[in-house]
Image: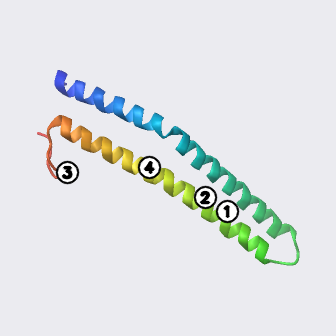
Amino acid sequence: MSPDLKSALDTVLTALDRLLLMFKAERLIHMILAVAGFLMLVYAAIQLMTQPKGLDMTQMGLLFGSSGLITLSGARVTFFFTKSFGLIEEVTRALVGLKDKEDKPG
């Protein structure tokens, strides 16, 4: 590996570490919300199985609300990682000297 390429790789990895550190609190909040949504979903499932009267509006609200919270939290974390790794890819391509995504090294 050439020294220039190694330097570029070190720069990109440092940038990735900084980016992940900057948004650590946001990712933590979304993960806590996902866990809370999962616990709500488990509670709603237990309520549904233990109550003989069947499904009512409260349980439906718990089911849909908790599944929506899980989906939203997971989507935000996925969106964050997709954007951050896309940015790292662009920086890497710029440092290495590739112009477009279609350019192949070599």
- Mark 3 → mark 2, Cα distance in angstroms: 33 Å
Judge from the rendering whether residue 23 lies leftward or rightward of residue 92; answer left or right.
right
- Mark 4 → mark 3, Cα distance in angstroms: 21 Å
User: Contact (CB < 8 A) between labels 3 and 2?
Assistant: no
**Mark linked to residue 80:** 4
Q: Secondary structure at mark 1?
A: helix
- Mark 1 → mark 4, Cα distance in angstroms: 21 Å
- Mark 1 → mark 3, Cα distance in angstroms: 39 Å
Judge from the rendering whether residue 22 lies leftward or rightward of residue 104; answer left or right.
right
Residue located beneath label 1 in the image: 66
Viewer-nearest of discs 4 and 3: 4
Residue drawn at x 24%, y 38% as measured from the top left: 92
| Residue projecting furthest to the top | 3
Residue located beneath label 2 in the image: 70
- Mark 1 → mark 2, Cα distance in angstroms: 6 Å
Q: Residues within 10 Å of mark 3 (few under 14, many from 20)?
A: few
Name the residue type under label 3: Lys
User: Contact (CB < 8 A) between labels 1 and 4?
Assistant: no
Q: Along the polypeptide, which appears first: circle 3 or circle 2?
A: 2
Residue drawn at x 23%, y 29% as measured from the top left: 8
Q: Along the polypeptide, which appears first: circle 2 or circle 4?
A: 2
Residue located beneath label 3 in the image: 101
Q: Residues within 10 Å of mark 2 (few under 14, many from 20)?
A: many
